[in-house]
Amino acid sequence: MTTASPAPRHRARPSSAADLLLRVAERERENLSRTLDALSASGTLELAAQRVTAARRRFVLGSDKSAAYAALLATDLSAGMSNVTLIEAGTARSLDVLCDVRAGDVLVAFSLRRYARRTLTFAETFKREGGMVIGITDDPGTRLAALSDVVVVVGTSSVSHADSPTAVAATVHILATLATASAKGARRRLDKRADLARTLDTYEMNTAAGSPDTLPTTLRRDKK
């Protein structure tokens, strides 16, 4: 967890850009190493991936800066599995989701400092309605951690005015990779997406065999 607020960290910055670069790079390496070591030791990231894969429907939520992490996870999950929905708390769509929560539904919620209330309120209601909550947060003592069925804690310590995104983004990437690698039909879906992208001429550089739109070789099994 990052304890210092943005303003003091900004005032304490080194006078030279070169010194600041070195300090930022070192802190980011520390954050990433500590977070991944802790997640590997606890097994919570693998457990979260199992819950996502086994879910009937998957919802992803984040507010403010966390909305970017939620969008990244939803995009990467939807490439390999169906029924992935990115939602925004406090909207009419979010109310529709809460009206229809069923057993087997999973919500992955991001709550990082300063902990947006609308995310927490939505997650509490989702769980009360019978869904499972996977919380990704920066402190095991947060409100989201207390209500979550699975808690994934990431480091956001920073020498910048902004809390570090590095370990959060890496955690999102690994979670999506693990969940997709275990998802039934993932290879077929990835291949179909690539074929459709070529047919529709969606991208400037269309995907081909061996592109990122395939399962990692080390994780690839028979997912047809």
Image (cartoon, rainbow, N blue to C red):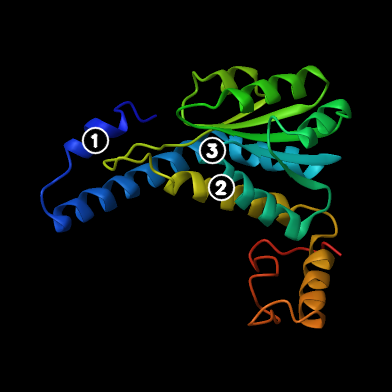
**Left or right of 51 in this view: 4:** left
Residue sitting nearer the eye, 206 or 155: 206
- What x and y, as percent, mark residue 116? 55, 27
Residue 64, labelled with which disc? 3
Q: CA distance from mark 1 to mark 2?
A: 23 Å
Q: CA distance from mark 1 to mark 3?
A: 21 Å
Residue sitting nearer the eye, 19 or 201: 201
- Secondary structure type for disc 2: helix
**Could you tell which of marks 1 and 2 lies nearer the N-terminus?**
1
Circle 2 crowding by C-alpha within 10 Å: few under 14, some 14–19, many from 20:
some
Residue sitting nearer the eye, 119 or 185: 119
**Left or right of 164 in this view: 140:** right
- What x and y, as percent, mark residue 176? 65, 51
Q: Residue at x 46, y 27 (%)?
A: 114
Q: Residue at x 86, y 40 (%)?
A: 56
- Depicted 216 relative to depicted 195: above or below: above
- Secondary structure type for disc 3: loop
- What x and y, as percent, mark residue 111? 55, 31
Which quadrant is home to the N terminus? top left
- The residue identified by callout 1 is 9
- The residue identified by callout 2 is 68
**Left or right of 93 in this view: 156:** left
- Which of the two marks, 2 or 3, is nearer to us in this view? 3
Q: Amino acid at mark 3?
A: Asp
Q: Amino acid at mark 2?
A: Ala
Circle 1 crowding by C-alpha within 10 Å: few under 14, some 14–19, many from 20:
some
Q: Residue at x 19, y 51 (%)?
A: 20
